[in-house]
Amino acid sequence: MSKFNIKYLKPFKNIYVIVLIVFVVWMLFFDAHSWLFHHELNGDIEELEYQKEHYRNEMAKDNKAIKELSTDEGIERTARETYYMKKPNEDIFIIEYEDSIQKPKKDE
């Protein structure tokens, strides 16, 4: 058993190996530029890039809506469809489908 321990512990008697191990442990876990800190920052960067792409998509959608509302036809269509506005002497009929009407509950 003694030879087994000596065989595997022999590299740890060298001062350079000990210093190297201490340096690697220090750099991985304790330093201000540690691997754990960089891993956390990389996660933050990925999240921010996802948010950046999301906001770019939202901006593209808003720009499309602005371009659509810059014409008189677009304004009229939006007013009619969204706000149910009408021209004078005009009747509007709102069609509700059977599956979109709320049914009364049996308790009422």
Image: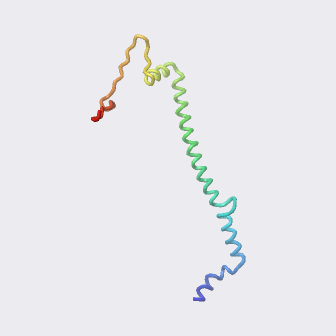
Instruction: Judge whether 1 appears above or below 34 on screen.
Output: below
Is residue 1 shown left or right of residue 76? right
Residue 41, horizontal then vertical, whole percent: 62, 53
Q: Residue at x 69, y 72 (%)?
A: 20
Residue name at image x 62 percent, y 60 percent: 36
- Name which residue lies at 56% across and 39% down: 55
Residue located at (68% from left, 59% from top): 33
> Going by the picture, which residue comes out furthest to the front?
108
**Quick check: 61 left or right of 80?**
right
Q: Nearer the viewer, residue 73 or 31?
A: 31
Q: Quadrant of residue 106?
A: top left
Image quarter of the C terminus: top left
Residue pushed farthest bottom?
Answer: 2
Name above or below for residue 45 compared with residue 75: below
Residue 23 at what x, y percent from top left? 69, 68
Tell me where residue 77 sits by quadrant: top left
Q: Residue furthest top?
A: 89
Q: Foreground: 56 or 86?
A: 86
Q: In the rendered image, which quarter contains the N terminus? A: bottom right
**Which of the colour schemes (rainbow, by chain, secondary structure, one colour) is used?**
rainbow
Residue ranking furthest to the left = 106
Give the total of numbered labels. 0
Residue 7's spot in the image, x, y percent? 61, 84
Q: Quadrant of residue 2?
A: bottom right
Residue 9 position in % (x across, y down): 63, 82
Residue 75 sits above or below residue 1 on the image: above
